[in-house]
Amino acid sequence: MEAQQSIAERDLLVMQQIRPSISDEFTIEDADGNIVGNIISTDSTQPRSSKSPCKFDVVDADGSVVIHVSAMQNFGRDAYSVNHPDGALLAGVKERYACFVREMSIEPVDEAPMTLHGSFLDRQFKVKSADGDALVASSARGRPSLAIGPAGRGRYALAFETSASEIQRLAVLGGMVALDLMDQKAAASANSWA
């Protein structure tokens, strides 16, 4: 029997949100629609819009933890840590100031930094090396709709370049979890003013 391919070895991951209007939890599917992993909350008692840290695990199909993602308390832009299963820091993720676009830095501990850049409105993102020369991954999502929740985060594809290293793939995956948390926090903030 052939060994199951790890999430970090796949060039295409399809994220499918579970209960879109009330959850940041996702199943992770391969190109054929087979579930190959999950993103699960590990602090479900904390409200997502609070300043309390939010913690998520990305797990392979066999249930083994691939990475931990945690929001870090700060008073500026959102920041997250992406950690190996043993707790060692894999990467830091920070939101950057930008007008009409979404931008984040993804900084692996052992590799060159990367930048996520894309349009908030059409929900398409690219992750490149910080110098902008090398594409690492891209993401495409559907437009926001009532059917998939107020932030339109119900389903998206994350495609990695075949040259992306395992560390880059895991850091980008953690960055995408952080991006979804930032989107939910922004939606909750907007709703509190309504």
Image: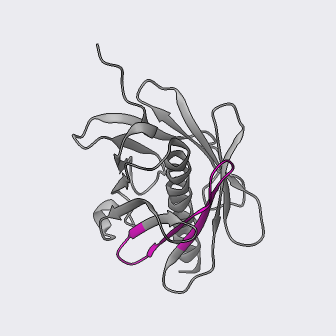
Q: Position of residue 191 (x, y in %)?
A: 53, 74
Left or right of residue 169, residue 87 in this image: right
For the N terminus, the image quarter is: top left
Give the image location of residue 120, x and y in percent.
44, 76
The foreground one among 151 and 6 is 6
Image location (x, y in percent) of residue 102: 51, 75
In the image, farthest residue toward the left: 32
**x 38%, y 46%: residue:** 18
Vertical arrangement, residue 118 with respect to residue 165, above or below:
below
Of residues 49 and 25, which is closer to you in this image? 25
Percent from the top left, x then y, of residue 133? Answer: 48, 69
Does residue 9 appear to the left or right of 87 in the view shown?
left
Asked if the stretch drawn in magenta spans residue 121, the answer is yes
Say which residue appears at 44% left-offset and 74% top-offset.
118
Q: Residue at x 37, y 48 (%)?
A: 162
What span is in magenta?
103-125
- Left or right: residue 61 compared with residue 77: left
| Left or right: 47 in relation to 100 | right
Quick one: 193 or 97, which is closer to the camera? 97
The image quarter in which residue 77 lies: bottom right
> As displayed, is residue 191 above or below residue 17?
below
| Position above or below: 84 against 184 | above
Residue 104 occupies which quadrant of the picture? bottom right
Q: Is residue 119 shown in magenta?
A: yes
Q: Residue at x 30, y 18 (%)?
A: 2
Q: Residue furthest bottom?
A: 99
| Overall secondary structure of the magenta section | strand
